[in-house]
Amino acid sequence: MPHSISSDPHGFRRRGVLFVLSSPSGAGKSTIARKLLDADPTLQMSVSATTRPMRSGEVEGKDYHFVDLTEFRRMTADHEFLEWAHVFGNRYGTPRAPVDAMLADGRDVLFDIDWQGAQQLHQIAGGDVVRVFILPPSIEELERRLRGRGTDSEEVIQGRMDRAHGEIAHWDGYDYVLVNDDADDCFAKVQTILKAERMKRSRQTGLIGFIRKMNPAGPV
């Protein structure tokens, strides 16, 4: 049975949710996204196209769609992206066609994108988009986490910290803002937001027919 009606005994269809998670690097966004996907197999991760080289262990079509700069520019010119941006010297974009198909089928799509991508997505998809921004407990804790990874040079860490200040400045462009003091607690709050947004009246496309059957003489 399709996901769009499987959890509803009345068989209401609904439009899917474009669920955006954004945060500065090191604030815990990727961990929460992974936990969301593990907890809900019906939630689909949006797979971005990118011009950056494939890294060891990555799989084409699962982690990213890897394209060269010429192809990326063509896709941009042909309006094949819902959003795209330059990030750390490479280009990333969300292909429109697979997302539109999932949305129309009532499936929910998870986006791991920055504030620029979230803004572009909202301008195009409007009410289908739910934007959640995750803050670190403090800027000092964010830097401690980045240094604790032990994988980045001092130059990279400073670049990420500079970018973090810029991203945090756009906190008011989101529907929900959470502070990630505790990963489990923050994850639970994100789950609550997703469940509530799925139930919004505006997404219940089958509700009008149900109401008409219940009250055929009344206004809809």
Image (cartoon, helix red, strand yellow):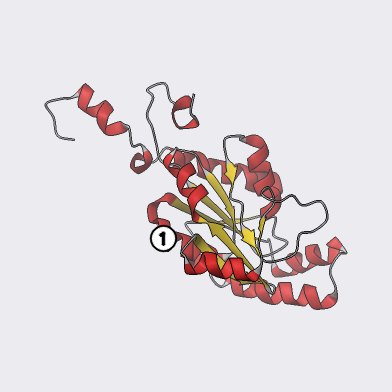
Tell me: 55 left or right of 9: right
Query: Which residue is depicted at the point 79% across and 65% down?
Result: 146
Q: Is residue 7 visible?
A: no
Residue 125 at x, y = what percent? Answer: 41, 56
Badge 1 crowding class, 10 Å Cα cut-off, few under 14, some 14 to 19, many 20 or more, is: few
86 vs 183: above or below: below
The outermost residue toward the left is 217
The answer to whether residue 111 is visible is yes
What residue would you read off at disc 1?
124
User: What residue appears at the point 38 percent right and 32 percent down from the top-left corner?
Assistant: 13
Residue sitting nearer the eye, 203 or 27:
203
Residue 174 picture location, percent across and down = 49, 61
Query: In the displayed structure, would residue 28 be above or below residue 154?
Result: above
Is residue 189 positioned above or below 78 on the image? above
Q: Secondary structure at mark 1?
A: helix
* Pick the front one: 219 or 180: 219
Q: Quadrant of the C terminus?
A: top left
Q: Is residue 192 left or right of residue 9?
A: right
Q: Nearer the viewer, residue 49 or 203?
A: 49
Relative to residue 81, is residue 53 drawn left or right? right
Asked which quadrant contains residue 26, the reply is: bottom right
| Label total for image | 1
Picture coordinates of residue 205 (x, y %)? 33, 37
Residue type marked 1:
Ile
From the top left corner, tell me how far across and down residue 152 is, in percent.
Answer: 84, 69
Check the image and name the residue furthest to the right. Answer: 150
Above or below, 61 against 207 in this view is below
